[in-house]
Amino acid sequence: MKIGRPRLVERDRKLEYRVDVESLEGASELWFGVAEEHGDLVSDRADAAVLALLLPAMQAGEDLYVEGPVSEKLHYGLSGLFQAVMQHLVPALRPVRIHAAEIGPATGWAQGVATGFSAGIDSFSVLADHHYGTPSAGYRLTHLLYNNVGSHGDTGNPLFRLRYERLRPAVERIGLPFVAVDSNLMAFYKSLAFKDTYTLRNVVVALLLQAGIGRSFHAAGTVVSGPPPTLPLHDIAHLDAVVLPMVSTEALDAQWVGGNYTRVEKTLQVAEIEDSYDVLDVCVRNDRAGNCSTCKKCVRVVLTLEIAGFLDRYAAVFDFDAYRKDRHWRVARILRKKLAFSMEIKLLARERGYQFPLRERLIALTRLDAVRDWVVGLAARTRGGHRWLQRRKARRSPLYRPGSRTSP
């Protein structure tokens, strides 16, 4: 796979970073775009392109040939152990060699400090420590990033723009520049799952902006102490602390932060940030802007806030009626499971003297929620059951009118 020298192109009040790519599948182009007001952050080095295209090259089994300048530190970091770690996560990957025409230190340490901001618990926790707190100057946030690198679905641009515009008023209150970074990176990661690669995709953006960003914070998805791991050990979230130094350069220090807090501790930390009350977004669904209030992540956060007595602070971002409907099934599932998230919530309830309703405890004890899930899953796999599920879904719609032929 050949990576051409990056070009910086001004177009439609944007600065675009464009790189020609040639592989066995044919010619293509990788691009990133930022508003012209943030154009001074964009680097013309090939570092971002190398990290962005290394995994697709490993998947295809093609060596990388790079025309633009590549950081010596990054080249070293990506050439050995990093590839072994990624093979552990994604066994289909194969080791490749990186042939760069220009290898040398990335010079010019920029003063900018950035983190990705999605208005979730993790990103607000980073702000709690590095914006609302009292960090030293070199660790105080100067920019917030919003990246279109896969979390907004395959047709990410419309939802990416919708979510960005929804968050912008809150970020204006926070008082930091909000840098939207659009891209077509997803086109090169079609068969590489976002959950296995999200850290690297976001570091690519940090490398792209290393002309103005010298330090980037990447929020921890796991905790280094407390209950057992929240995710399987083959999840990239458990390897961020190992991987991030290998994808840094002489001019960009990528750091893993927040691993000293449990999920409940982060939630309680964020609940003290007034700027989060009308914008917190924790939903696991990527087909909407805002919280559905019924997915597993929404339920965990709402239940934590409820136990802690902070639920009324977030009336603007959660649908409490939707949360309370069938709440007993969802909460019972949390009580039954032995995952760290569940254990943390039960520990908080014990500390706060919160008593779960008897109905929820009985469902968890008898595993009725698991039986219910099995029945629903079985129904979904049969023709008649599929029609039943469609009718069940229609009855839950706000447009449903009993007896009407036009009901959904």
Image (tube, grey):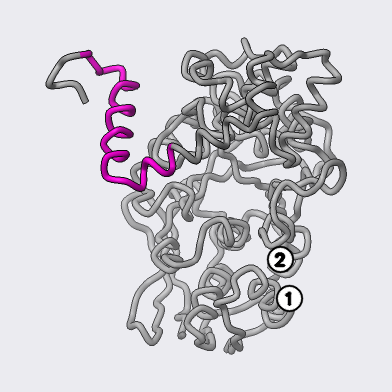
- Residue at 54% x, 54% y: name it: 40
Q: Which residue is mark 2?
A: 248
Identity, as a three-letter code, of the amino acid under mark 2: Ser
Question: For residue 118, what is the image quadrant?
Answer: top right
User: Is 17 left or right of 242, judged from the image as shown?
Assistant: left
Closer-to-camera residue (146/71):
146
Q: Secondary structure at mark 1?
A: helix
- Residue at 71% x, 26% y: name it: 270
Q: CA distance from mark 1 to mark 2?
A: 7 Å
Q: Which residues are magenta?
A: 376-402
Q: Residues within 10 Å of mark 1 (few under 14, many from 20)?
A: some
- Residue at 50% x, 37% y: name it: 373
Q: Secondary structure at mark 2?
A: loop
- Residue at 69% x, 68% y: name it: 247
Closer-to-camera residue (26/136):
26
Question: For residue 102, what is the image quadrant?
Answer: bottom right
Characterize the magenta stretch by its predominant secondary structure: helix
User: Is 335 left or right of 136, judged from the image as shown?
Assistant: left
Tell me if residue 64 comes above or below residue 88 in the rendering: below
**Contact flag, marks 1 and 2 (Cβ < 8 Å):** yes
Where is residue 111? Give x, y as percent: 72, 51
Q: Which residue is mark 1?
A: 73
Tell me if residue 234 comes above or below residue 65 in the rendering: above
Identity, as a three-letter code, of the amino acid under mark 1: Lys
Image mark for residue 232:
none
Q: Residue furthest left?
A: 405
Could you tell which of marks 1 and 2 lies nearer the N-terminus? 1
Where is residue 99? Give x, y as percent: 59, 89
User: Is 79 left or right of 117, judged from the image as shown?
Assistant: right
Question: For residue 248, what is the image quadrant?
Answer: bottom right
Where is residue 136? Give x, y as percent: 85, 41
